[in-house]
Amino acid sequence: MGVSVSVERLRRWLLAGGGLLVAVIAAFLGVAHYRAHRFLTELPAKLGADIRQETNGFTYSQSDGRRTIYTIHASKAVEHKDGRYTLHDVGIVLYGRKSDRADRIYGSEFEYDQKEGVVRAMGEVHLDLQAPEAANASAKMDYAAGKDLEGGAHEADAAHMIHVTTSGLVYLQKLGVAATEQPIEFEAGGMKGQAVGADYTADTGVLVLHSAVKMEGVEQGQPAVLTATRAELDRDNRMATLLDARYVSTGRSGEESGQAARAVVHLRSDGTVERLDAEGAVTLKNADGGTMTAPRGVVVMNAKNEPQSVLLTGGLVYGADGPLRKAQGSAVEGRLGFDRDGKLTDAVLTGAVHLHEQVRGASTAGTPWNERALTAGAVELALDTDAHGKSRLRDAKATGGAVLALVDRSAKGAAKGVAKGKAAKKVQASGPVSSSLAGDVLTAKFVEQGGVNHLAEVHGDGHTSMRRVNAAGVVETSSADSLVAAFQPVGAEGKKSAKQEGAGRDEIASAMEQGHVVLTRQGVKKAGETAAPAEERVTAERASYDGALEMTTLVGNVQMSDADSVLWAERVVANQKTGDATAEGGVKVSYLQPKAAKGAASGSAAGSEEPVHVLAARADVKHAAETAIFYGTAGQRARLWQGASQVEAPVIELDKKQKKLVARGDGSGDAMAVRAVLTSAVRAEKAKVGAAAKDGSTAKAGAAEQRVFQVVSRGLVYSDQKREADFTGGVRVTSADGTMLGRQAEVYLQPVQAAGAKGKDAAKSAVGAISSGFMGGSVERMVASGGIVVEQPGRRATGEQVVYTASDGTFALTGTADVPPKVVDEERGTVTGTLIEFRAGDEGVVISNGGESGAGRVRTETRVKKRR
């Protein structure tokens, strides 16, 4: 996510070391002033006791019997008649309580007004603070006189001192205040500082540097400058306060800074920083221009002056604006953690976290910006340090409705425009590729190459979802209980695969979703269409996506649905690019039939809207061609049905675009053949003319009766446009009117009747309602040819072609000159002719004879009474 850029250099941003130096210097100034005023207060009594006039070469030490408290040296001391005293070339050394250090104050001239209680340093004053103790009493006297500095005895220790220079120092004994309005300069550990004006109050122990506080030098090997408009030290409470504090460090990578309107440094008893409290536009800025700002900040330090934790509160804001990267971010609170060496290890952002980043591969004009965005209730970052000491992001955990969005504008479909003609226009018109991942919890792993963090893997738990939009605008969404997404790998030199050219691209290479998986696909409206394609929806227990192959595999109670079909299976493999799919295991498909327009001629509601169902072991669905091929097994054929009509075969192919069905057998035997069930409905007044029903009843005139035909063949081709079903490879048709055999047969289906008809038309509509079924409705007639055999109870007919009319159950049998049609009746014998017509249940047979074109036709009807 690039979040690491905002925190990877925070250790140097904190700059607590610089703040510490200011606080320590302020502390020593306070201590020095305190000790100096005490000595100067007691000085008149000493002078009055021991010096009555001008004295040269004066040295005095005060001890408590166990240790030396201070040593004074002056080249000359003068007592004035008005009670004032003047000391020339003064050197004062104050020793610590344990005599383990020495603070030296020296100047050209000091003046004390006993009556007013005022001590003044006339001219420049120098302070050497925190110097080591002199070796012996003689050395103490020499040190006070400054001889050791000239002789070099303590020259090696000078680097460890804090040296302060000022002038116009005044101490007001009655107020307990020491102050100067003159510039102050100090130096320590290679750092030089300055300020204008200072005052110290003995009662409160507070030292104030009035203005223009500045310190500069080398911090961690880099030039650094610390400034403040005012500095205050509370010696008793070990607390230093800086106003308008700003720290700037300049390294090879650029300038880094930290600032706050008010910074409070809390000190330990040994002078090290324990905690830093900052408030008022607390801002941290790195060398890349990234900034982090919050109203308040707290830094906790260890004894080595290394940060241990940072807390930014009140509304954290992050921003970066570079030629290759732009970023914005916000959170209510941010917390940073460090190891014992002060290296950043973790960061936690809480409260409405939002991070947005734009990156590109080059700063040249026209180079597209790719985007990353993260929103969550909280984000936890884990970091480590590389061989160069640079912090890098390792893991990130986002909780509380986390959403990670990625937009790729440099994808091939969106970025390339080098093709010519229409192809170029098509490419240029395509949009960016985008994806997003969401969940109650998102955990991301990163890899760092070439100084850039790249997403390696994202885990999602709890109400997870994924959304992808391709260059054409097709939107695919998914939801599940859990999610694992892997991203395109990064090469050894930080370069992504050839499919991922361009910096900042985060392309999903694979994804696995589990538990209550729901996927949807929304196509794009094509030119000339009034509405976008209907949404496609899939449910499963598990879904896996392969980005290289652009394939999705669905497992466990899979259900796929679109505007006019629903598919169920145990396993489905779908091509995301083409929409094609292969389904396996208990495949079932239902095709919803379109409703007829209001007022238009159509079949009955039951017929026109009843779905088509398919059962198969496996299915191949071709999305663009709108075809589906269903496969059975050796023990169970594929089965398709609508209402009472059905087809069973080893292979069934549906072509929705051509409105065509193809069924194929496999091998020999009925078990591997195509089996079809067709229906036909007729009015009883036609079907029962001159004959009683087989069960002895008489059908009511005008009532509808349904006939069922079972057809077995090796192949079937049905065209809905022609309303014709062609059976090939040997055909057997079985119905109540008998059994018919042939090499092939064509079945013609009558059109369904218009709804709302009256009278006779109403009766026809009733017939249509019953006969409505698979393949558009009722059987009208059949034409079978090639080795025809028709068998009925007590009757067998043979020929080369037979035409069966469903409305009256009539068979019209023909043959050839060499093999004329023939009917063999068990009781009446054999008859033949050019054309033989007969009906089931009717004893009559009509025979027609004649030459070509029917000339001289003779029609004979024979009726023989049955034997009792």
Image (cartoon, helix red, strand yellow):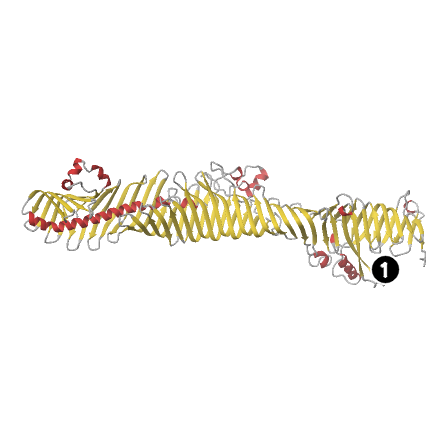
For the question of whether residue 594 can be seen, the reply is: yes
Residue 664 on image: x %, y %: 74, 45
- Is 557 on the left-hand or right-hand side of 252? right
Question: Which residue is under mark 1?
Answer: 694
Q: What element carries label 1?
A: loop
Q: Nearer the viewer, residue 662 or 277?
A: 277
Quadrant where the image shows the C terminus:
bottom right
State whether residue 858 appears in this view.
no
Q: Where is residue 488 in the image (x, y as percent from the top left)?
A: 52, 41
* Three-letter amino acid code at the position of disc 1: Lys
Position of 115 with respect to 702 (left or right) is left
The crowding category of the residue bearing disc 1, from other C-alpha atoms within 10 Å (few below 14, some 14 to 19, many at least 20), is few
Residue found 79% across the figure and 44% down from its top:
729
Lateral position of residue 631 relative to residue 7, left or right: right
Residue 804 on image: x %, y %: 84, 51
Percent position of residue 304, x then y: 31, 45
Query: Going by the picture, which residue comes out furthest to the front?
Result: 66
* Residue 340, quarter of the rendered image: top left
Residue at the image point whose x is 53% and y is 49% from the top: 483
Of residues 738 and 346, the one drawn nearer to the viewer in this rendering: 346
Of 644 and 794, nearer the camera is: 794
Q: In this image, 560 relative to 33: left or right?
A: right
Count up the numbered dots: 1
Most foreground residue, 105 or 339: 339
Q: Is residue 40 above or below residue 704?
A: above
